[in-house]
Image (cartoon, rainbow, N blue to C red):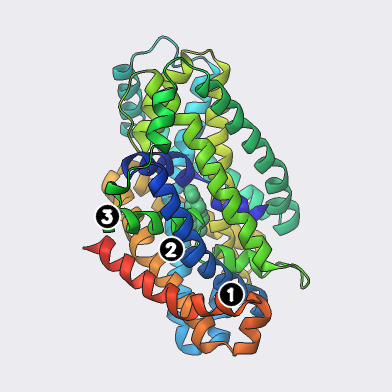
Amino acid sequence: MAMAGSAVGLGNIWRFPYMVGEHGGAAFIIVYVICCLLVSLPIFFAEATIGKSTRRDTFGALESISPKSKWAGYTAILASFIILSFYSVVGGWSIDYLIRSFGGGFSGRSMAEAREVFAAMGASPVESVSCMLVFLGLTAMIVGAGVDKGIGRFSKISIPVLFVMVVVIAVVSLSLPGAGKGVEYLIRPDFSKLDAPAIAAALGQSFFSLSLGVGTILTYSSYMKEDENLISAGGWTAFFDTVFALIAGFAIMPAVFAAGIEPAAGPSLVFETLPVIFSRMGVVLPVVFFMAILIAALSSSISMLEVVVAWLVDQGGMRRSHAVLAVFGAAAVLGSACAVAPRVFGACDFVSSNVLMMFGALAFALLVGWKMPREEALRHVRYRFVYWLIRYAAPVMIVAIAVTNLL
Ligand code: PFF
């Protein structure tokens, strides 16, 4: 459940539905699923194998397999920290909007007014930084409570609730007059739109969505019981993550089309278009929507914080509570910079998703495929063809997308 929580996040809500529509509907979904099966899942298994077989934090795990791969431990932990910082800014926005929704803050507003509200929030350092700190504080409280009592308990309760919330929004959205166009946007297959950038986008999105390459899956797997099967954990996580992304698409796009609005991706979709549309249907729907975004963001941010905390505890010998406080302080500084400077936010997003994540994923695949004793790797990944995918196919594909994305 915690792995599913890490995977399900803002990426599913504000990027996936738009990407599907832009890159050919069902045609893109098919490519996305193939990418998941052939590349992302094998990377997931590789990352989980490292965690489960070494039972150490990201840095210690990589070092124990090959001392030369220490640097990859550092880049993965750094990536988790950077993603945590800018993700907390968006988490803060969702808290801000949740509070506004309680007061019926968007009812009767036009789209232009909603745009002004969003711009004013971004322009007010006090508002955006304080909301970011509240979000980071919630993340720290859950992680500080421990792996079982904090992360485990939060995930077991919040993920089913989140699922129900998104299904409810999807049902409402699909019942609106004119919703059919949104469904068509999502599923009508258009294979002519499947060019190389679309395939690279599918693979990049599946990496981000499954939280790969930054040590979250590695760290969570190091806490698995010996008899737990990482193939089924990975399979369920990917299945749940994809189903959730599709349901989010059906919660969002039909409502957007029913209101006669052009779809967009990213902040403007979630913080400008949707609050106005959902407020037309009463006070409850916006509250449910922003609550869902908050839960989705929290269940992901706790996994990023855990990577850094596990490293400080295992390598630095710190007490868990001190480690949580230290990372909270450092992320508060970078998060504040992201909250007030859109350029810093953009740079953090770009460097972590396009460079560091790819680096980490490549390192994990190469370590399991080429450095770890074959029998040990096979003991965890179980199937020879999965081992083959980790050893050959995944590294080649990662280099190919990294090059396509950076060009
Ligand atoms: N998987 C999350 C999402 O789709 O929003 C993002 C994410 C979470 C990336 C955790 C990296 C990570 F370590």
Residue matched to label 1: 316
Kindly report which numbered mark, 3 or 2, lies closer to the viewer in this rendering.
3
Q: Measure the alpha-carbon separation of dots 3 and 2.
A: 29 Å
Using residue 387 as the reference point, say whether residue 257 is left or right of it. Answer: left
Task: Locate residue 164, reporting x and y percent.
Answer: 65, 33
Residues 162 and 185: in front is 185
Q: Check mark 1 vs ligand 1: CB closer than 8 Å? yes or no.
A: no
Kindly report which numbered mark, 2 or 1, lies closer to the viewer in this rendering.
2
Q: Which mark is residue 79?
A: 2
The quadrant of the picture occupied by the C terminus is bottom left
Q: Which comes before the other along the chain, label 3 or label 2? A: 2
In the image, what residue type sits under mark 1?
Answer: Gly
The correct choice, above or below, for 329 with respect to 124 in the image is below
Q: Quadrant of residue 197?
A: bottom left
Task: Locate residue 32, reporting x and y percent.
Answer: 44, 54
In the image, what residue type sits under mark 2?
Answer: Ala
The correct choice, above or below, for 97 with respect to 44 in the image is above
Residue matched to label 3: 195
